[in-house]
Image (cartoon, rainbow, N blue to C red):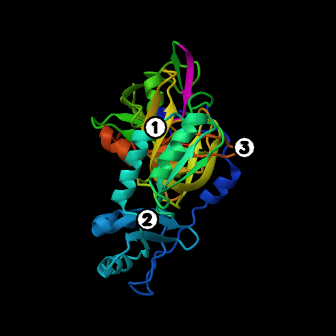
């Protein structure tokens, strides 16, 4: 087991074996970007990922219908905000004074949302996915290797019907699937055999008891979970949502269990999780999973819809909405694992994707903020003594 259970039943977030050394080197030590804006109000601020996410949320409310998405330019460490082109110079001034770099675009958020609805109505077939890409101001549509023949024709014709400047479409290798099995983080037994997933983040349930978040399809697959393959259950699913969304709240059976709010990134090192935050396109993120350990990449799309082939109905589709799309790799057993920033922001829970950590691929994540809102849980330690004194949690590599 890759995490240590220590006195007072203090549980640590342990979601992987050997970490990817390249990603770990980036994470630790943590390099902080300057947020100095001494050059003047109209000069874009230099921001860390957390600051960019916060500024994007503020501007979305400030600019209203003129806001058409945003993304983080990692090269300049600036937030780029899309606004609808027109004569409303006040919108541009407001965004620039707030510290963003402003770019005028053609497609509004409402238009992109309407286009996504058309895709949902006409192109919901297993193996397809789409998300909003603010860098191109278009919807990016993906089709995996199983989408062929009339299904592929349907996807192409639907995208074409949206117009040349509204969406792009491309094929991706492998097939979109949820990533259950494999790994060594949390285990369950079902009538069909063993199931293994990854613990995401420790939280406190709305009733004050200790719990953790993982993927919804893990919670739907099994009710009770153990921290070892043949061990007795230590936690029971309280809430599980899949499809539509993909999150589970799993409560520790012993209410005296104390938890730590960190992620084990391997080699005896952890990253302290301090807050939940929304994803921003262009932001570097890190994923920890029980099969493949630590990997990093970039957020490439938001509000993604993924149409997984149903595992219970050969002719069915399990559609999940509102996901984060990234180019971080993942494999079977990484489901439910944590997606986070180097500044300690909890961003997502691994849902599924295509490819692997050899060839790469696209991977999708349930936003943590949505899971917390839906379950009423709060991120962080549970129990008055958590993290106190000599019982500070540690993690094995």
Disc 3 to disc 1, how far (Cα)? 29 Å
Q: Quadrant of residue 52?
A: bottom left
Disc 3 to disc 2, how far (Cα)? 31 Å
Residue highlighted by disc 1: 124
Looking at the image, tell me whether mark 1 or mark 2 is earlier in sequence order.
2
Give the camera-side residue of 144 and 388.
144
Whether residue 162 is visible? yes
Q: Residue at x 38, y 74 (%)?
A: 85
Label 3 Cα neighbours within 10 Å, binned few <14 / some 14-19 / many ≥20: few
Residue 379: image x %, image y %? 38, 46
Q: Residue at x 41, y 68 (%)?
A: 106
Residue 386: image x %, image y %? 41, 42
Give the camera-side residue of 369 and 131.
131
Segment tinted magenta in the rendering: 192-199
Looking at the image, tell me whether mark 3 or mark 2 is earlier in sequence order.
2
Q: Nearer the viewer, mark 3 or mark 1?
A: 1
Q: Quadrant of residue 144?
A: top right
Q: Nearer the viewer, mark 1 or mark 2?
A: 1
Q: Quadrant of residue 67?
A: bottom left
Residue 323 higher or lower than 94, as above or below: above
Residue 331: image x %, image y %? 63, 37
Q: Nearer the viewer, mark 3 or mark 2?
A: 2
Residue highlighted by disc 2: 70
Residue highlighted by disc 3: 358
Disc 1 to disc 2, how far (Cα)? 27 Å
């Amino acid at each position: 087991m890759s995490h240590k259970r220590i006195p007072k039943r203090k549980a640590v977030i342990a979601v992987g074996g050997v970490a990817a050394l390249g990603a770990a080197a980036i994470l630790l030590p943590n390099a902080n970007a300057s947020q100095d804006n001494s050059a003047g109000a109209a000069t874009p601020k230099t921001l860390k990922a957390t600051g960019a996410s916060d500024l994007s949320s503020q501007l979305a409310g400030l600019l209203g219908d003129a806001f058409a998405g945003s993304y983080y330019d990692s090269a300049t460490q600036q937030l780029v905000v899309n606004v609808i082109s027109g004569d409303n110079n006040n919108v541009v001034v407001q965004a620039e004074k707030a510290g963003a770099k402003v770019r005028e675009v053609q497609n509004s958020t409402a238009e992109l949302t309407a286009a996504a609805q058309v895709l949902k109505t006409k192109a919901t077939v297993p193996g397809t996915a789409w998300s909003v890409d603010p860098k191109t101001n278009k919807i990016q549509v993906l089709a995996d290797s199983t989408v062929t023949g009339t299904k592929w024709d349907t996807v192409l014709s639907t995208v074409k019907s949206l117009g040349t400047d509204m969406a792009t479409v491309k094929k991706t290798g492998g097939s979109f699937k949820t990533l259950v099995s494999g790994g060594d983080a949390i285990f369950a037994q079902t009538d069909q055999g063993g199931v293994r997933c990854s613990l995401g983040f420790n939280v406190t349930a709305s009733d004050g008891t200790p719990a953790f978040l993982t993927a919804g399809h893990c919670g739907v697959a099994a009710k009770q979970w153990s921290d070892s393959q043949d061990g007795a259950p230590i936690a029971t699913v309280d809430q599980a949502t899949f499809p539509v969304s993909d999150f589970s709240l799993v409560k520790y059976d012993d209410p005296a269990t104390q938890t730590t709010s960190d992620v084990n990134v391997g080699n005896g090192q952890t990253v302290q999780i301090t807050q939940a935050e929304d994803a921003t396109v262009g932001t570097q993120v890190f994923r920890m999973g029980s099969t493949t350990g630590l990997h990093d990449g970039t957020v490439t799309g938001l509000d993604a819809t993924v149409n997984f082939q149903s595992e219970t109905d050969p002719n069915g589709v399990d559609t999940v909405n509102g996901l984060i799309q990234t180019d971080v790799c993942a494999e079977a057993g990484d489901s439910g694992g944590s997606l986070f920033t180097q500044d300690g922001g909890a961003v997502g829970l691994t849902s599924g994707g295509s490819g692997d950590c050899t060839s790469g691929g696209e991977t999708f994540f349930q936003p943590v903020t949505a899971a917390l809102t839906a379950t009423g849980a709060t991120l962080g330690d549970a129990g008055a003594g958590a993290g106190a004194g000599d019982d500070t949690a540690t993690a094995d590599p």
